[in-house]
Structure formats: C-alpha cells, structure tokens
Image (cartoon, helix red, strand yellow):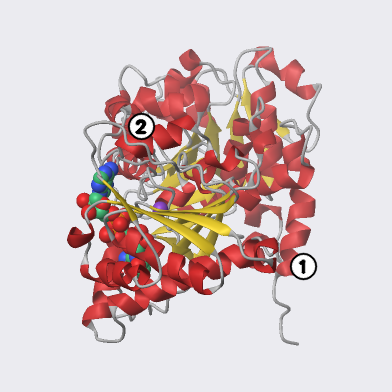
C-alpha cells in the first residue's frame, strides 16, 4: 500500500521519531539533503562527469535547511555553488541554522528579504548554471510567496531554460503539499525529491504538472507500530494500486450466477449507446449476466447491437419495480444516456425508495440493499434537490460525478474547491470528496486525472492517471460510461463499493494505457482480457 501524507501527518511522524530519541532533526536533514543529491546524480548522470554550477535557493524554514545541506554536498563534490537565502539567517529554525553555519564555512550567501517592499534585483541568471535547487518552501508553505519569487517564477519558466535542470526539495515552492493547488505561483520542477512518503499534493490537482518526476527518499523514519500507528489508518489516503489477480479471477467451480446479474438502464431511442458501452464494460469485467433495461420503443435499437448482453423491457417506474422483484438482479447502473426525466422516475425505484403504483406497495422500511451506481443524468436529475437524493442513498451505492456533476450535487464544496487558495493548507479534492461521501452516505468517486474515491467512514484513495500512469486518451466521449459499467460489473460480482470503485478506476486507466493513442471508449472494455492476463502473470504462483 502506498500511503500519501499531509504536511501535518508528516510533521507528526517526524516529531514522534525525534522525541523517541531514535534520530535527531539534524540527522534527518542531512539524510534529506544527501537523498536529493543522490537523486540528482541518478537522474542526470551527465552531471557526475565534470564540475558544474548550481544555484541553491533557500527559504526561511527547514526546507531551506535541506537546501544548505545540498549546497555543501555539491561543493564538496567540486561544484561551484551560489546560495540565496530568502529570510533572516538569525531567524532560521535550529537545524536549518546549523546547516547555514556549516555552509558559511565553505561559501557565501546572498541574503534577501522574505517579503520585500519592492522587487529586488537578484541576478538569478547565473551564466553556465546547470542545476537550480528549490529549497524555498516545502510542507510549511502557508501563503502565496511574494516579491522576487513571484517575479522570478513568472518571468521565466525555469524548466524551459535550456540545459538547466530544476530539482525541488520535497515540493516545488508555491505548491500546497496537502492539496496540489498553487498559492498564486509556483516553481516548476523537473524532479521533486520527497521524504519518507509522498504527499497528497504530489498527486492532486496541479501537483503532477509542477513536480516533474517524483523520487521518494527514505530518511530512516520507522512506521508506527500496529497498536500505536503514527497516523490513524482511517486518516491515511492511499494511492490506488494494481489489484490482486485473485480478486478478479473466476474459479473453475463457479457458474455465471456466481458472478451476479448487472442491469444497465437505458434512455430514449437514439441515446442507447452510452448504456451499451456500460453494459459491455460490466460483462467484460466479469459480471455473470448483463442486461440492458429499456422501454418497448428502444428494443429494436438495442437488439440490432447486442448479442451476449440481454435486453429486458420495463416501461416506466412500476415496470422497473416489478422487474426488481427478482433479487438475482444484484447491481444496477443508472445515468449513461438515461435522460434526466427518466432518471427522476427510475432512480427512487432503483434505490428501493419508490412507491410503485401498480402494486400499491408502501415504501419499504428496509429497502433492498442492491448495489447501485449513479452517474451522469442520474446525478444531474437531482441538481435542484440533492437532499432528496441523499435521503434515498444507502451504503451499497456509488456516485461517479465529474467536476460539473459534483458541483451540481455539492455546490458549497465545489465553491470551496474552485476558490483561489490564499493560504495553506488549501482545501483539497480529498477534503471535498470525503465531505461529499459523509453527506451522501455512500461511496463517491470524483473523476479526473486525479480521481478521488471516498466512503462515509473517511477512508479515501487517489487513482492517479499521472506520472508513469498518464492516460490522456481517456479524455474521450463515453469513457465515463465505461467506468460506470466496470464498477457495476464488479459490484455484481460482490465487491464492496469502495473496492469496486478503486478497482474499476484502476482498470479503466490500465485499459487506456494498454491501448494508447487513438483510444475511443469502445476500445476500453476490449482491453480487459489483456489487462487481466497481465495481472495473472504478475500474481505470485501458488505453491504446489
Ligand atoms: N518533516 C520532516 O520529517 C522533515 C522535514 N524536512 C524538510 O522540512 C520541510 C518543512 O520545514 P518547515 O516546516 O520549516 O517548512 P518550510 O521550510 O516549508 O517553510 C516554513 C517557513 O516558511 C514560512 N512561510 C511559509 N509560507 C511562506 C510564504 N509564502 N512567504 C514567506 N514565508 C512563508 C513559514 O512561516 C516558516 O517560517 C520539509 O518540506 C522538508 O524539506 C527535512 O529536513 C527532513 C525531515
Ligand atoms: K521546495
């Protein structure tokens, strides 16, 4: 499991280690600086060949302290190093000050105001400079950085400057470590070297655009014990990773009914493509049976297109309620191509909250806990009255909004997320998704290249389609319908909502990566066999 930490959690782990007496802050800082230098040489071995010139920018906190360590180690390696300190040397925290002093035995420091009244001429354009080390701010960033930094960052996109590499210590300055949002402006790095564990901001929002490559450096901090974890498990955000093959495999002694029956509800004639995409995805991911549910007028369109996927007729809410008397139909998907009017009629029935007129049945006190995925129109249908939807949702539901749909259901949370951040830590997509899940009472998968999944308990994870898992071709019509279908199929197979949402999101990205350029939504389910085979080959062989 890859854990992602907030700045506060990281500080807690560091403090606990120092208080335990197992390590000093100075030792941690030395390991951090050394880790940065090692990462630089590993990434750019040409810099090992001869002595080079580096500019090291140090800020007023411990991130600056790491910068002084890097400056010293590069100097000892034979480099020419120019060091700038933004802040007062006498106000540096103790470990940073100790490293400032050690550096001063070797070289000069150009000291500048942290908040200058007017712009200063910093002459950062050091001729022949090969490396810029950003040690201005790390996890302690609390407000937009100003003055020369703003001018500096805005005037030049450092990483575009020919032959100059930019390495950020921990996080690129200006990037909020908790949210991945930029406080006004940020330095764009080619590589960011972070310590102990990556931070949420490396994977959320603008983080991946600003960080370049992420390198994780072990500075010898031990994880807490199981009885006294340094960070409570529920508060830790995980990066969604490759699922276990066993979770997706089919056992030889199982039959199709062991893998559930998924229903995908479709809309008016001519809009059924989205439902068929979702249905195909549910079938490919292994649901035992998949049916598209439609009205009489839509049967011909589906019949012309579907073979292994069955068609079930339901003209209106009462007919759907009658169909759902069959408890073998264990997972439903509503939204793709459904139309908002039809969604308003059918969603309450799907959630077991309807009062079907044909049978005159009173609203059930304990509605059947059938798994339900609500996407697209099924979310938009409740834009005027989200509380009505939340009152019907239950723990087997998954909502899969994109940013627009999220804003319709949770306008106050979206507003906080969209507001320009003025201080750190800024409100993050993880914060918003967790709050949304608690309010809705079910699992929420908030889509994007930084998809966040959260359940009401506060458990949360990020499925990042960034860095080495980038899948830009997923931005194509129908891709969300396929994701909803994957999740529905996995729910039909019996996964929990959180596991189905995480696994579906991971497979979605993996299918896109397996296909590559030119991808359209139809291609995604067709890559499932290849992706499943790869998972099988990666799985450890069973002992004979
Ligand atoms: N937590 C840990 O376990 C370790 C932390 N280390 C380093 O320490 C860093 C965190 O150090 P700090 O907590 O001192 O935080 P930072 O060094 O990121 O910055 C905090 C300082 O900057 C000021 N500040 C914040 N935003 C500002 C702005 N926009 N303009 C002007 N001043 C601003 C704060 O008031 C504070 O003085 C990490 O990012 C990492 O680089 C490493 O030394 C290794 C171990
Ligand atoms: K930094």
Residue 68 lies, in percent from the top left, at: 38, 65
Q: Is residue 1 visible?
A: no
Residue 380 lies, in percent from the top left, at: 43, 21
Q: Is residue 58 visible?
A: yes
Assess mark 1: CB under 8 A from ligand 1? no
Give the camera-side residue of 184 and 527. Answer: 184
Label 2's element? loop
* 196 vs 136: above or below: below
- In the picture, residue 49 is in which quadrant? bottom right
Q: Quadrant of the C terminus?
A: bottom right
Q: Earlier in the sequence, mark 1 or mark 2?
A: 2
Q: Which residue is mark 2?
A: 353
Q: Residue lying at the far left in this picture: please name it.
A: 91
Q: Residue at x 26, y 34 (%)?
A: 422
> Which numbered disc covers residue 537?
1
Cα–Cα span, label 1 and label 2: 44 Å
Assess mark 2: CB under 8 A from ligand 1? no
């Amino acid at each position: 499991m890859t854990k992602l930490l907030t700045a506060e959690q990281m500080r807690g782990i560091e403090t606990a280690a120092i208080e335990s007496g197992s390590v000093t802050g100075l030792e941690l800082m030395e390991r951090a600086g050394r880790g940065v230098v090692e990462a630089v040489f590993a990434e750019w071995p040409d810099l090992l060949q001869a002595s080079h010139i580096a500019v090291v920018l140090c800020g007023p906190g411990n991130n600056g302290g790491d910068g002084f360590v890097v400056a010293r180690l590069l100097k000892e390696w034979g480099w020419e190093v120019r060091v700038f300190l933004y802040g007062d040397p006498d106000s540096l925290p103790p470990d940073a000050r100790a490293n400032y002093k050690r550096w001063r035995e070797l070289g000069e420091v150009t000291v500048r105001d942290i908040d200058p009244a007017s712009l200063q001429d910093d002459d950062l354009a050091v001729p022949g400079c090969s490396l810029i080390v950003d040690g201005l701010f790390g996890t302690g960033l609390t407000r937009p950085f100003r003055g020369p930094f703003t001018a500096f960052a805005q005037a030049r996109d450092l990483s575009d400057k020919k032959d100059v590499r930019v390495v950020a210590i921990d996080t690129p300055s200006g990037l909020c470590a908790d949210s991945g949002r930029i406080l006004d402006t940020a330095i764009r790095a080619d590589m960011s070297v972070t310590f102990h564990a990556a931070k949420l901001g490396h994977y959320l929002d603008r983080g991946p655009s600003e960080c370049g490559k992420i390198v994780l450096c072990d500075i010898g901090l031990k994880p807490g014990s199981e009885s006294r974890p340094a960070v409570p498990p529920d508060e830790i955000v995980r990066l969604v990773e490759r699922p276990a093959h066993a979770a997706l495999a089919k056992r030889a002694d199982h039959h199709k009914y062991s893998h559930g029956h998924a229903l995908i509800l479709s809309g008016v004639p001519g809009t059924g493509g989205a439902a068929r995409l979702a249905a195909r995805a549910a079938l490919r991911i292994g649901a035992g049976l998949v049916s598209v549910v439609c009205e009489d007028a839509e049967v011909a369109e589906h019949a012309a297109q579907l073979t292994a996927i069955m068609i079930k007729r339901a003209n209106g809410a009462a007919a759907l309620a009658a169909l759902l008397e069959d408890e073998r139909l264990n997972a439903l998907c509503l939204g793709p191509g459904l139309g908002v009017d039809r969604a308003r009629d059918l969603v309450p029935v799907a959630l077991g909250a309807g009062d079907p007129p044909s049978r005159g049945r009173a609203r059930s006190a304990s509605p059947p806990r059938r798994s339900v995925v609500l996407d697209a129109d099924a979310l938009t249908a409740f834009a005027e009255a989200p509380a009505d939807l939340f009152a019907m949702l239950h723990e087997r539901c998954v909502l899969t909004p994109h940013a627009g749909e999220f804003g319709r259901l949770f306008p106050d949370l979206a507003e906080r997320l969209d507001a320009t951040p003025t201080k750190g830590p800024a409100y993050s997509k993880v914060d918003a998704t967790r709050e949304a899940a608690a309010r809705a009472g079910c699992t929420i998968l908030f889509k994007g290249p930084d998809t966040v999944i959260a359940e009401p308990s506060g458990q949360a994870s990020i499925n990042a389609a960034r860095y080495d898992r980038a899948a830009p071709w997923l931005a194509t019509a129908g891709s969300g319908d396929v994701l909803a279908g994957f999740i529905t199929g996995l729910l039909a197979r019996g996964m929990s909502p959180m596991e189905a949402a995480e696994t579906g999101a991971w497979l979605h990205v993996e299918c896109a990566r397996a296909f590559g350029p030119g991808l359209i939504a139809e291609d995604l389910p067709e890559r499932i066999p290849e992706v499943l085979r790869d998972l099988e080959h990666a799985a450890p062989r069973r002992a004979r």
